[in-house]
Image (cartoon, grey):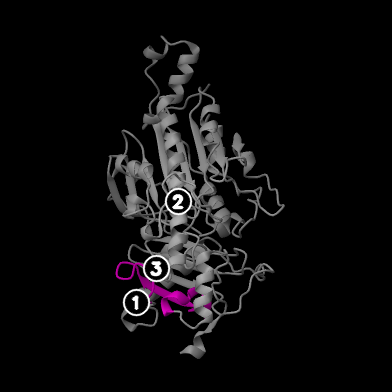
């Protein structure tokens, strides 16, 4: 077994190693390089976690991770759609650069994931739970699966998490490891009484872009139950790491793949769609209970993991290592985070850039409404209000057209992005600056709108309930 020394993680002193048996030497050599565990929740917004200030969602394990590590308050996804986000994270590339920017699109064979570099350097790489990297609806791409040593997908129960501990126990003990542990929670559909103490309608915190109705509150309560269920499974893995004696040498990251599955969240490029919980615990390297306001993007995960492992970055990476932030929470690695919205059962072409304070959105199809497609009690309630003419302006995002071709939001003064400042002369310079920043990023990453965009799924209605031109 070849061990490459790193200035950050030196191999054990030779005089100690000579005294060990071959198996003990292999075990100690593996410990000299850190392990990695990435927990990725499904459809969980950043502010629906106790560590981020939610008063009623019960996430004691995730909260403990934040107490023992670093909480990132400005972490952003490259997309608010399941499979494109996952492909983006594991390649360290933006969705349009992976060739898998649409939902259910298999990762193309020419795309290299950072797990390949880890494997070549002697790491065991495993995945368990929700897979969603090699297509859906009958598609069976293989490029992603072949870049892990072991994939345990399917059979994980409704949560998708029941094989997480199994994978950890099946790992070879003489190698450092990277584990990708993905849940189905909190993806719809929801069930009753999935945890011992379900959340109630009274626990719901209703954002202003949703109507505060009993149906919506009950829907949010079931969503909270799923977040608590994934929290329980994370706890089981952390207990197993401790029992195996590797917790102190394991880098743990918790995040989500997109925002909550409610209107104006999932499939959007607002903060409610692409701002993610992002917590790192790394004993001995990351100080407990630290918080950073520095911007990070999920394309930065791959470069960070490889740098920590002492491995050269992939030439294809489009992100930057956030190791400097882990060492100093005031450090900055980027000024802007970029996100996109492509096909997710309906046609879309949106691009967005987020600075620390502002978000700029370009909509290439403003004549089409952002029709939210997941059937739910919330959607049914909002449909009813719309038919009855009782919708408030802040609820209309998924029910109206045309939409603005450009939008600018002050995310400090307007955290829910309800007031579009693009037409306000006071913000003309900010608008022009961010418009140019986004245009430059699109040019650098070869982001060209396809001549023909994928059409809406046949069962999706795109007729707007409200014509904003007429209503104004």
Task: Identify whether 266 is placed above or below 241.
Answer: below
Q: CA distance from mark 2 to mark 1?
A: 44 Å
Query: x, y percentage for residue 229?
Result: 46, 45
Classify residue 217 as left or right of residue 455.
left
Tell me the element at label 3.
strand
Mark 2 = which residue? 225
Mark 3 = which residue? 359
Query: x, y percentage for residue 59?
Result: 38, 46
Residue in the image at 65% along x and 45% along y: 143
Mark 1 = which residue? 429
Classify residue 366 as left or right of residue 227.
right
Is residue 193 covered in magenta? Answer: no
Q: Earlier in the sequence, mark 1 or mark 3?
A: 3
* Disc 2 to disc 1: CB gap under 8 Å: no
Tell me the element at label 1.
helix
Q: CA distance from mark 1 to mark 3?
A: 14 Å
Q: What span is colored magenta in the figure?
A: 392-419
Q: Nearer the viewer, residue 350 or 369?
A: 369
Task: Identify whether 462 is placed above or below 55.
Answer: below
Q: Residues within 10 Å of mark 3 (few under 14, many from 20)?
A: many
Tell me the element at label 2.
helix
Query: x, y percentage for residue 158?
Result: 56, 46
Q: CA distance from mark 2 to mark 3?
A: 31 Å
* Disc 1 to disc 3: CB gap under 8 Å: no
Residue in the image at 46% along x and 27% along y: 4
| Numbered circle sitting on residue 28 | none
Classify residue 136 as left or right of residue 402.
right
């Amino acid at each position: 077994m070849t061990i490459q020394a790193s200035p950050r993680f030196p191999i054990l002193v030779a005089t100690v190693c000579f005294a060990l048996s071959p198996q003990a030497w292999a075990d100690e050599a593996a410990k000299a390089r850190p392990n990695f565990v990435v927990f990725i929740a499904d459809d969980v917004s950043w502010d629906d976690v106790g560590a981020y200030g939610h008063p009623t969602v019960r996430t004691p394990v995730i909260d403990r991770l934040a107490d023992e590590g670093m909480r990132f308050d400005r972490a952003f996804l490259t997309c608010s759609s399941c499979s494109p986000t996952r492909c983006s994270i594991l390649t360290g590339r933006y969705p349009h650069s992976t060739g898998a920017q649409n939902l259910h699109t298999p990762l193309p064979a020419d795309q290299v994931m950072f797990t390949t570099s880890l494997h070549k350097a002697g790491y065991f790489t495993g995945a368990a739970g929700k897979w969603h990297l090699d297509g859906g609806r009958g598609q069976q791409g293989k490029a992603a699966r072949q870049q892990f040593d072991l994939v345990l997908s399917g059979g994980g129960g409704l949560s998708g998490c029941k094989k997480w501990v199994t994978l950890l126990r099946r790992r070879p003990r003489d190698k450092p490891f990277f584990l990708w542990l993905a849940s189905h929670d909190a993806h719809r559909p929801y069930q009753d009484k999935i945890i011992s103490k379900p959340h109630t309608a009274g626990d719901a915190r209703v954002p202003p872009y949703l109507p505060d109705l009993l149906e919506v509150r009950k829907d949010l309560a079931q969503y909270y139950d799923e977040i608590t269920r994934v929290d329980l499974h994370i706890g089981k893995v952390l207990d197993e790491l401790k029992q195996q004696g590797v917790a102190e040498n394991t880098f743990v990251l918790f995040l989500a793949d997109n925002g909550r599955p409610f209107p104006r969240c999932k499939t959007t490029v607002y903060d409610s769609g692409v701002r993610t919980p992002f917590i790192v615990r790394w004993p001995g390297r990351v100080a407990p209970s630290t918080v950073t306001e520095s911007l990070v993007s999920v394309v930065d995960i791959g470069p960070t993991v490889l740098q920590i492992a002492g491995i050269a970055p992939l030439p294809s990476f489009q992100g930057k290592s956030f190791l400097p932030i882990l060492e100093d929470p005031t450090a900055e690695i980027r000024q802007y985070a970029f996100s996109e919205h492509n096909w997710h059962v309906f046609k879309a072409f949106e691009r967005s850039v987020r600075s620390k304070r502002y978000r700029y959105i370009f909509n290439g199809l403003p004549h089409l409404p952002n029709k939210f497609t997941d059937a739910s009690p919330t959607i049914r309630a909002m449909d009813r209000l719309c038919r009855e003419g009782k919708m408030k302006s802040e609820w209309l995002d998924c029910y109206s057209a045309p939409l603005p071709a450009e939008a600018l939001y002050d995310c400090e003064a307007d955290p829910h992005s309800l007031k579009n400042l693009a037409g306000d002369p006071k913000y003309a310079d900010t608008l022009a600056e961010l418009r140019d920043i986004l245009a430059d990023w699109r040019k650098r990453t070869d982001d060209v709108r396809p001549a023909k965009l994928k059409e809406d799924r046949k069962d999706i209605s795109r007729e707007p309930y409200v014509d904003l031109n007429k209503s104004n």
